[in-house]
Amino acid sequence: MNNYDEVQQNYKKWHNIENKENYEKIKKSFLQNHLQQGITRVQIEPTNRCNFNCIMCPIDEIEPTKRKDLTFDEFRLILSKLPKSVKNICLSGLGEPFLNKNYIEMVKFAKEQGFYVEVYNNSSLFNKDILKYADEVNFSVDAIDQKTLTEIRKGVKPDKLFDTIIEAINNKLKCKININFTVNYKNYKDIKNIYQFCQISGVDHLSIQATSNNYFPKTEKYIEFKKFIEKNKLIDWEFIVKNYDKKYNFSLTIWYPRKLKGFCAWGFSNIYITSNLDIIQCCHQVTNPIIFGNLKKEEFNNIYNSEKMKSFRSKHIYDEDIFLCNNCPY
């Protein structure tokens, strides 16, 4: 469903900012609302292994001995400890989820427990049986142009990627089929082709997000990728917005690199749980994260209400320094 007017309004609100005066008031209200509504969405990492080597992904920072798949029993344990306020489970994380042999069973089990279930994947191991259980399946597509795509998503087979998306659309029942596009200075001009593919193939929703530097700060790879990120100033966001047509049948969400930071739901209503059952700060800096606690040893509510996690939320509200958050574009 087209949301042209909303896209235009959000561009003015979050990128071409028209009202800075109420920023602090709006930010505090935003965070307090996310705190008061309780935890509604939990992202659970099925594995921290991957068969791709995308340029923006820090997965190679994880030592081989620490690479792990979440077991089905561990997954059941996590769900049993979640507060009743949780409605949405995003069963994806740093790695490629279909590498976990129990992945489809996990999605099925989560759905049977009454959760809305999101799936993100790179298409390489996609199994259409997932369509019976997931509420939405998201495919990562960072270009239509094959040269650009293979430069960014190393390991991808372009023809297989697009064929798999079309297969999913043709076989879906009530499940939504979405595309996640990570934009950078090299691929943003390909957005017209992305829009056309979404329209012609019948994609339900397109999400565009700015490429972030998720390597651990001050490391060699972080410094190297920082040069890439700095070139993202060349991205013409207005070009991206203007080329979204009122006639398109898919909806669009754009996550801009925020000029006004502090609007973050992580640690408030959104929680990230690793394949090792650690509760950490968010989905971005996951290789050397802030660890608040582990669900093998502690109860969820005890971790969420711990002094360490309350301090993390307080620093967001009062705009105090958080080392891992300093370079986040959101």
Image (spheres, rainbow, N blue to C red):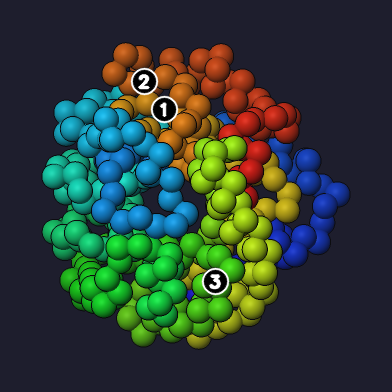
Query: Tag 3's secondary structure?
Result: loop
User: Spatial distance from mark 3 to mark 1, Cα to Cα?
Assistant: 34 Å
Q: Earlier in the sequence, mark 3 or mark 2?
A: 3
Q: Label 1: few (<14), some or many (≥20) within 10 Å?
A: many
Return the x and y of residue 200 as percentages of the image width and height: 36, 85
Residue type beneath disc 3: Lys
For residue 93, which quarter of the picture? top left
Q: Label 3: few (<14), some or many (≥20) within 10 Å?
A: some
For residue 60, which quarter of the picture? top left
Return the x and y of residue 193 as percentages of the image width and height: 46, 82
Which residue shows up at 55% across the image and 52% down it? Answer: 225
Query: Tag 2's secondary structure?
Result: strand
Query: Tag 1's secondary structure?
Result: strand
Residue 294, numbered circle: 2
Q: Which residue is mark 3?
A: 186
Q: Is residue 93 above or below residue 53?
A: above
User: 158 or 102: which is nearer to us?
Assistant: 158
Return the x and y of residue 141 as percentages of the image width and height: 39, 68
Which residue shows up at 58% across the image and 20% down it? Answer: 310
User: Is any atom of residue 33 visible in this view?
Assistant: no
Which residue shows up at 44% across the image and 57% down it? Answer: 55
Which residue shows up at 51% across the image and 15% down it? Answer: 306
User: Is any atom of residue 239 visible in this view?
Assistant: yes
Residue 279, numbered circle: 1
Q: Is residue 262 above or below residue 224?
A: above
> Contact (CB < 8 A) between labels 1 and 2?
yes
Q: Earlier in the sequence, mark 1 or mark 2?
A: 1
Q: Residue furthest right?
A: 21
Q: Is residue 294 above or below residue 121?
A: above
